[in-house]
Every structure is written in structure tokens, then in C-alpha cells.
Image (cartoon, helix red, strand yellow):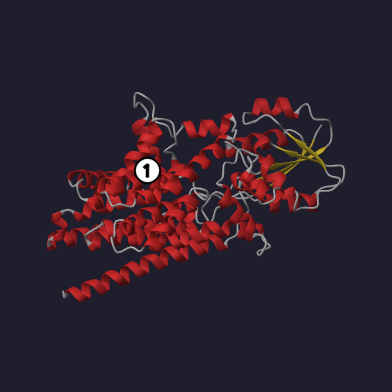
Amino acid sequence: MPEEYKKNIYYILTALLLLSGLFLRILFYAYGRPFWNDEAALAINLTDKNFLELFLPLVHEQVTPPLYAIICKFCSLFITKAEYAHRLPALVCGIFSLPLFWILAEKTLNNKIAKIFAVMLFALNYQLIYYSQELKQYSCDVLLFLGILVSYFYLENKNTSKKMLAALSYGYAISMWFSYTSVFAIFIVFLLCCIKKTGVLKRFTFPALSLVGLVFFVKNYTTDAALHSFWDNGFISADFSNFAKLIFNNMIFYFTDFNWKLFIVIVFAAGVFYCLKNLKTPNNFILILPATLALGLSYFHIYPMYTRTALYLLPVVFLIMAKTFDFRFFEKKAGAFTAGILTIIFTIFVFKTDFIQVIQKKYYRETTPQLLALYLEKAKNTDILVIPHLSAINYEYYSKKTNLNNKNVIIIKPELYEYDRIKTIYDTLPKASYYVLLTHSGDKKLELENLKKYAMSQKNFQISADGFDNALIYFQKQ
């Protein structure tokens, strides 16, 4: 096949994959689903605080970069529906990440099949699609991490103008106030510049000063035990006893509901081997360095390498996996045919898994506004609304948007899952008619089952539930 045809096929396939990724991100965002618990917690801050107050510690365990929070709040000035407004920055980041990833793939991969394989993984990955429509900063983490790594190739270019270098310097300084993990990418670029002796080290003075300010800013945050516990899950223990489990959990998260886990492990291991074998090549070093840094940060308990907190690392994981197809074997006709078949099969499986999940709306969902509207429709003035502990944040946010004046509300402080504990607490409630609103829980299925069991033991039990274990439960206390 002529080389020109090969290039045309490569660009057509790449464009189709990028367009598929664009379509899925916009489609997921367009659903406009209600905020779930963690989003509602941040939305409360965006609603209740002015722009300057977003530089102060946030409530409800939220530790969000202030400039990202400000952009999310700013969008609500132009878009009335909060779910669309506050999630718009995540969507924009998700969309612009697509071409940036392709550029980085062009810079770091050699084989065209390897590039197509990498773009396919990035464009169709469920987690990247999901976080392109969630009110959190993780989509921004991915965009800025990619952008900063791509910028290195302009820093090392002697033809890059002084204006461009200055712009990159200011961009680095500002980026860390949009995404804390961008600091890691800046550090990686700084190390690469030191090794290459590119003569642009003075361009890191302003980012260094910005980092000092950021450190003092972050020190003002105080978080509770729940958030500390979540972060502890992403730290490697001193004896490495949890190392394998941590990597396994991250792989499950990165490739959620995807059955070819063994294939993923083999391809990733082969990619790591290729990069280490050719470590002197800068294009391989720029991929190994982020993974190594993430492991070091996790080991020294600086930043966790755990599920969504490590989403910024996912593009590097994909590129390392794609490095497998840079082996010389895949440059030959038999190897190219094998790589092509594997890529096609893997694309079909990924597309089937992630596309179907998005189309069928198989994602974490909490329908608080719908259930509150149902409560207002059914409840009498004497009825009491009970809010379990972990559903309280959802209730706090959406109750402000719902006419609940003169309604009796009881918030249950302890987290209750087991039937005996639920019975003990609910038995102390006075005789009356109750509605229980369940939209978020650490073990929602169990809590719903036991709440139903308790309500059925009372009078006139009724339940309105959906397919996501959200429920409005009615009973009369005997």
C-alpha cells in the first residue's frame, strides 16, 4: 500500500475516534443528571460563597483549586440550570484534552497503529467520559497535565520565541491554581529541561513563586477523618504490602466493567519494558517519569495514587500501553497485521463497554430533586421528612431550590446501615407519619433494604424507588 494511502487511513481513523470521544462527552453532559453527593457538596460552596470566598477553606470536605471553582461559579451567570452551568468547565476540559492527547501521542509514539491504539483508549475510556460531565476538577487535571507535557517539546525547540517561553512560564504559574496535579507535570518538565540543559530554567522562577504561595494556601485547609481515610487508600505502605492491591484497584477503576483485565496487564507490562529498555530516548523517559513520580508521591504520603485522584496519570498509562506496538516486530507486515487485529478487537470491546454505559445511562445517579418534588406532591403539613446522614448534603443543596417552607424535617446524624441500629434510632421518633428520603449512602442497597424492612413493620408502608436505589419511603409510626 502506498505511503500516502497509509497516512490518509491513519488520519481518517484518528479523526473518527476523536469525533466519537467528542460525541460521547457531549452526550453524557447533555443528560443533565442531578448532582450526586460530592458534586452537591461543591455546588453548595459555589452557591453560598462569593468569588473571593472561594479562595477560603470550603465546607463539606471540599478541597477544590480556587480558580477552577471560580470558573464553575462564573458559568452560572450565563446558564440558569445549575447542573449544566457548573459542569461546563469539565466538559470543555474533556473536549480540549482530545487533541492534546493526540499531539502527545504523535510526539511519543512511533508506530501509527500504536498511535491509533492510544487515541482509541483515550477517546473511548469511560472514566474520562464520565469526569467530562462531573462537577469536579479531575477533567481539568487531565487537560493541564497533558498540556504541560506537550509544552516541553516547545521548550526544547530552539526556534521557540521569547514571547512563547514567557507565556508558558506564566501559564505554568497560573495552572496550579486550576489543578493541583499540574505541579507534578511542571516538575517533570523542569527535570527534563535540567537533563537536556535547554537554557530555559529561568522560566521556572515565576512558577516556583506561585508554588510557594499555593503551599501556604493549601495549608489553611482542614479536612476531617473521612477525607483523610480516602487519601490513605492511595498511599503505598512502607513495606509495599499494599502495592499490588493499589495498582490492581487503579486498573479496575481505569478500565471499569471491562473484562479483558489480563490483556491490559500484559500490554501495560510490555509497554513499561519497552520504555525502560529504551530509557535514553527522551520520548520514553517523558512517559516513565510521571509514573515514577506518582509512585514516589504515594510512597512518601504526599499525594495519593488512587482512582479519581490519579486520573491525571491515565493518559500516560495509555501511552505506555501503546508503546507495546513500537516493538520492531510490529513494524513488519506480520506484526503490523497482528497489531491491527488486536487494536480492532480491543476497540470493539471498549466501544461496546463504554458506549453502551453512556447510552443506557449506567452511571452513578442520585435523583434528589425528583424525590423532593414527589414528597411535596404527596405530603401533608403534619408529615415529617427524615433525611439519613449521608443524604443530608444532597438535601441541603436541592431543598434551597424547592419550596419546603413549614415542612417538618429531621436529619439523622449517625450513619445507619444495619437493621438493628436503624430500628433503635427510628423507634425513638414520636408517633407521626414519615417520609424517608434516601439518595446517598456508603452502602445504599443495604440501607434501603433495612429501611424498607423497618417501614414495612409500621402502618401504611409505601415506597417510590428507581433503578439506582434512590427512594422515598412512607410509613406511619405505630
How many residues crowd mark 1 within 10 Å: few (<14), some (14–19), many (20+)?
some
On the picture, is 336 further left or further right than 415? left
Out of 103 and 341, give the one closest to the viewer.
103
Q: How many marks?
A: 1
Image coords of residue 93 (percent x, y): 49, 58
Query: Residue 174 versus residue 123: which sits nearer the camera?
Result: 174
Quarter of the image where the C terminus is located: top right
Q: Position of residue 247 (x, y in %)?
A: 36, 37
Residue 455 visible to the viewer: yes
Q: Is residue 106 above or below residue 371?
A: below
Three-letter code, disc 1 = Met
Residue at 39%, 53% in the rendered image? 148
Indicate the quadrant containing the N terminus: top left, top right, bottom left or bottom right. bottom left
Residue named by callout 1: 251
In this orientation, which residue lies closer to the viewer: 129 or 179? 179
Closer to the camera in the image, 362 or 27: 27
Name the image quarter holding residue 161.
bottom left
In which quadrant of the rendered view does residue 334 lie?
bottom left
Residue 147, by quadrant, is bottom left
> How far across and how far down the image is residue 451, in percent?
67, 35
Secondary structure of the residue carrying tag 1 is helix
Tell me which residue sits at (36%, 34%) in the image: 296
Q: Is residue 174 above or below residue 333?
A: above
Residue 258 in view here: no
